[in-house]
Image (tube, rainbow, N blue to C red):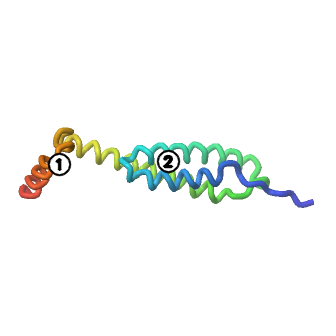
């Protein structure tokens, strides 16, 4: 008798969270970190469930793809957060809030090169 496979729980959600983590890294990195960590945690749980009985579940490809995209999203988000911290420390918070002063600092930096 043939056994019916069911979709692995949260497979599509993990894939969506992985995609959102890559997109979210462009929003100052924080949403990308959140979505990426959620995708990785959910993928780890789904991976354990799948490894216990792989014959019962389908859709494991979504879990693997979502986890990979979650990892990429977390790495990109960490780089974005580090870049923003560097910009704030280099130019200063007051400079970043003042458009004219920021323009002057960028022009000074360009002339020094």
In depth, the one of 92 and 68 nearer the eye is: 92
Q: Position of residue 18 (x, y in %)?
A: 53, 53
Which residue is depicted at the point 50% across and 53% down? Answer: 20
Badge 1 crowding class, 10 Å Cα cut-off, few under 14, some 14 to 19, many 20 or more, is few
Q: Residue at x 41, y 43 (%)?
A: 30
- Residue that badge 1 annotates: 99
Which quarter of the rendering shows the C terminus?
bottom left
Task: Where is residue 7? Give x, y as percent.
Answer: 73, 54
Q: Secondary structure at mark 1?
A: helix
Residue 98: percent from left, percent from top: 17, 44
Name the image quarter holding the N terminus: bottom right
Residue 107 picture quarter: bottom left
Residue annotated with mark 2: 36
C-alpha gap between disc 1 and disc 2: 33 Å
**In the image, 54: left or right of 16?**
right
Q: Residue at x 44, y 51 (%)?
A: 24
Helix, strand or loop at label 2? It is helix
């Amino acid at each position: 008798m043939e056994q019916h496979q069911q979709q692995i729980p949260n497979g599509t959600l993990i894939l969506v969270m992985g995609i959102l983590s890559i997109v979210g890294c462009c929003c100052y990195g924080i949403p990308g970190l959140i979505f990426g960590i959620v995708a990785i945690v959910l993928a780890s749980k789904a991976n354990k469930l799948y490894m216990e009985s792989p014959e019962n579940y389908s859709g494991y490809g979504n879990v693997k793809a979502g986890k990979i995209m979650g990892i990429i999203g977390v790495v990109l988000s960490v780089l974005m957060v580090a870049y923003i911290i560097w910009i704030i420390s280099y130019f200063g918070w007051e400079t970043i809030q003042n458009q004219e002063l920021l323009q002057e600092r960028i022009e000074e930096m360009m002339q020094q090169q």
